[in-house]
Image (tube, rainbow, N blue to C red):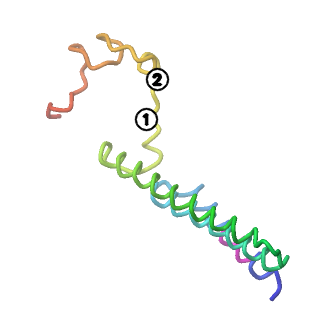
Amino acid sequence: MHLAYPAVLAVLLFCTGLYGVLARRNAILVLMSVELMLNAVNLNLVAFDVWLRDALHAGQALTLFTITIAAAEIGIGLAIVLLVYRNRGTSHIDRLRALAETGTEAAGAAGPGSGGTGPDDPRPTRGEATA
């Protein structure tokens, strides 16, 4: 078998995953697109390992490491997405940009008016109901 067939398939998979990362706004679809890109890399690693006839099978060993990293990435990524969805009610990436800490909140000051949850803070605490 020629090396061109799996290489072209890997390029198509990688480009599809890249389009998904750049065009999608749902965090779950972005994670799936990253997985698609990693699978394209795995296909290239195995194809070049077979083509080079490496005695140590380094391509296949690297593929196992990549699969392990991908499994950890999807597990942690899904946990973060579920936590954000529970707190925010959405998993759209454009609306998640407000997660960054700004000004005095990042400094860790907890006094009134400094971003903490003091008596002057208008934000509801965990036990209060929102209107």
Residue labelled with disc 1: 99
10 is within the stretch colored magenta? yes
Label 2: element kind: loop
**Is residue 62 positioned above or below 130 on the image?**
below
Disc 2 and disc 1 in contact, CB within 8 angstroms: no
Visible residue check, residue 125: yes
Visible residue check, residue 131: no
Task: Locate the C terminus by quadrant.
Answer: top left
Label 1: element kind: helix
Q: Could you say which quadrant of the image residue 129 lies in?
A: top left
For image coordinates 30% across by 43% down, the residue present is 87
**Is residue 77 positioned above or below 42 on the image?**
above
Q: Which label number is shown at residue 102?
A: 2
Q: Observer-nearest residue: 13 or 22?
A: 13
Main secondary structure type of the part rendered in magenta: helix
Left or right: residue 116 compared with residue 37: left
Q: Which residues are magenta?
A: 8-13
